[in-house]
């Protein structure tokens, strides 16, 4: 017998049995809204708010002394937060640092690890990765005088939604020096097998790193165990630290002997940074991949947010997230497929291949249905041309909200309410 049914009572029962339900009270849920966009911009928690206010108080009361006397000290804030995040990705504490933005971190990591030599002159990626990663990699190739058309190996998707790991492995030829892939694809929500891809890359002498923006905070990782070379992720999606929050990166300690690609004084060995020596002496750990001064107020909310993750536990979060996406897909299958609804699910069903969101596809009316949902107070997001992404967030989305979202979509189609909206998408979707 299926563990779910379509009745409202089932959603209420799931909520009452949910061991993580009390975490919802730690978040500000926008008034009257059902927020399903935490995979794009996670909601503010009281904890993150308090840590930001505390940083402001320290600035107000301590001025420059906040560098050492702030609570926590600003000078070592990025290292402290990196150590706190390490368990989320199965890394050692000194292998993670909070710094900069994803795109800048990727530039620095590619500068570090892409050393074209002899016939190994190519970078492997996939056609469904986030565009900024592609831009960064292409520009890095150009900086080496290499034509992206020839030196970027772009693995094609067979269905336009997912990437087959075996196609990636087949593309790992002798001329590939570096591979950069997403952990979870931002549109379909497919989770790639990082362990397998890491092992296959290493068998072929290829360094491999992952864009984990859509997995960290929703999916546990075991980077140390897998030997993954590097990774980077943002703190504004599942980690709920606010728009433009400082990003994070991981470098496996086997690479601590390598100089980072981009040098700056914030990557200097901390104990000697203020010697102001003209010769660069990098920190002996992932801290070396910092460039400039910590962005304190974009970093501070991560401190509060990490308290919640430490309490809730990433394995518990993953368990609930998988159950919530399974429940959402069950309701879609039972209520929104077939005439006149015609929705499809673009996310893999297998839990080991699924991240934290569900891609709901509608071939002709996705834009207008998305707009109608927003008008009703549901906050999804839209990815051109036909994907409505729905992300139940284990820390603050209830099962009953998932049930309500599906009822809203059903009513929007039943009443043809979507027809009142324009067919063009907004500037930010
Ligand atoms: C998967 C993925 N990679 C990279 C980025 C770029 O991040 P940033 O703006 O911090 O450079 C984003 C932004 O949303 C993203 O979703």
Image (cartoon, rainbow, N blue to C red):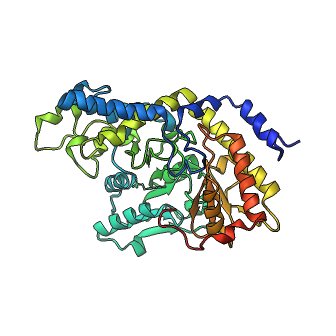
Q: Is residue 268 visible?
A: yes
Q: Nearer the viewer, residue 290 or 425?
A: 425
Depicted 175 relative to depicted 83: above or below: below
Q: In the figure, residue 152 lies in which quadrant?
A: bottom left
Left or right, 323 with reference to 79: right
Where is residue 304? Give x, y as percent.
43, 32
Q: Is residue 174 visible?
A: no
Q: In the figure, residue 99 lies in which quadrant?
A: top left
Residue drawn at 36 percent across, 36 percent down: 300
Where is residue 144? Give x, y as percent.
29, 66
Q: Nearer the viewer, residue 356 or 182?
A: 356
Q: Which of 108 and 334 is in front in this view?
A: 334
Ligand 1: which quarter? bottom left
Residue drawn at 46 percent across, 64 percent down: 131
Which quarter of the image is occupied by the N terminus? top right
Where is residue 179? Give x, y as percent.
46, 58
Left or right, 237 with reference to 287: right
Residue drawn at 51 percent across, 67 percent down: 426
Left or right, 385 with reference to 305: right
Where is residue 391? Give x, y as percent.
61, 49
């Amino acid at each position: 017998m299926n563990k779910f049914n379509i009745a409202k009572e089932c959603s209420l029962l799931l909520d009452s049995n949910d061991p993580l339900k009390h975490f919802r009270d730690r978040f500000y849920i926008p008034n009257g809204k059902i927020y399903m966009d935490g995979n794009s911009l996670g909601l503010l928690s009281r904890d993150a708010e308090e840590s930001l206010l505390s940083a402001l108080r320290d600035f107000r009361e301590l001025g420059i002394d906040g560098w050492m006397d702030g609570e926590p000290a600003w000078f070592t804030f990025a290292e402290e937060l990196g150590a706190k995040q390490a368990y989320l990705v199965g890394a050692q504490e000194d292998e993670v640092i909070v710094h900069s933005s994803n795109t800048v971190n990727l530039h620095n990591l590619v500068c570090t690890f892409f050393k074209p030599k002899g016939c190994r002159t190519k970078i492997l990626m996939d056609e469904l990765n986030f565009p900024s990663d592609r831009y960064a990699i292409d520009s890095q190739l150009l900086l080496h005088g290499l034509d992206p058309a020839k030196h970027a190996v772009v693995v094609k998707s067979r269905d336009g939604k997912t990437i087959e790991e075996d196609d990636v492995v087949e593309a790992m030829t002798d001329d590939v020096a570096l591979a950069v892939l997403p952990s979870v694809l931002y549109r379909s929500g497919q989770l790639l097998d990082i362990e397998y891809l890491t092992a296959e890359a290493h068998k072929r002498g290829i360094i491999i790193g992952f864009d984990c923006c859509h997995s960290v905070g929703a999916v546990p990782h075991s980077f140390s165990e897998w030997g993954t070379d590097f990774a980077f992720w943002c703190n504004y999606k599942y980690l709920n630290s606010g728009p433009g929050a400082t990003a994070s990166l991981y470098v496996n300690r086997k690479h601590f002997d390598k100089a980072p690609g981009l040098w700056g004084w914030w990557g200097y060995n901390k104990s000697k940074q203020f010697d102001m020596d003209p010769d660069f002496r990098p920190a002996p750990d992932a801290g070396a991949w910092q460039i400039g001064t910590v962005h304190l107020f974009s970093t501070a909310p991560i401190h509060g947010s990490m308290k919640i993750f430490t309490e809730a536990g990433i394995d518990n979060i993953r368990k609930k997230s998988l159950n919530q996406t399974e429940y959402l897909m069950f309701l879609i299958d039972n209520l929104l497929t077939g005439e006149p609804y015609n929705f499809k699910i673009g996310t893999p069903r297998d839990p080991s291949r699924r991240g934290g969101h569900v891609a709901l596809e509608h071939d002709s009316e996705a834009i207008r249905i998305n707009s109608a949902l927003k008008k009703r107070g549901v906050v999804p997001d839209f990815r051109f041309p036909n994907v409505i992404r729905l992300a139940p967030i284990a820390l603050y989305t209830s099962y009953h909200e998932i049930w309500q979202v599906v009822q809203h979509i059903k009513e929007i189609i039943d009443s043809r309410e979507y027809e009142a909206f324009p067919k063009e998408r907004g500037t930010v979707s």
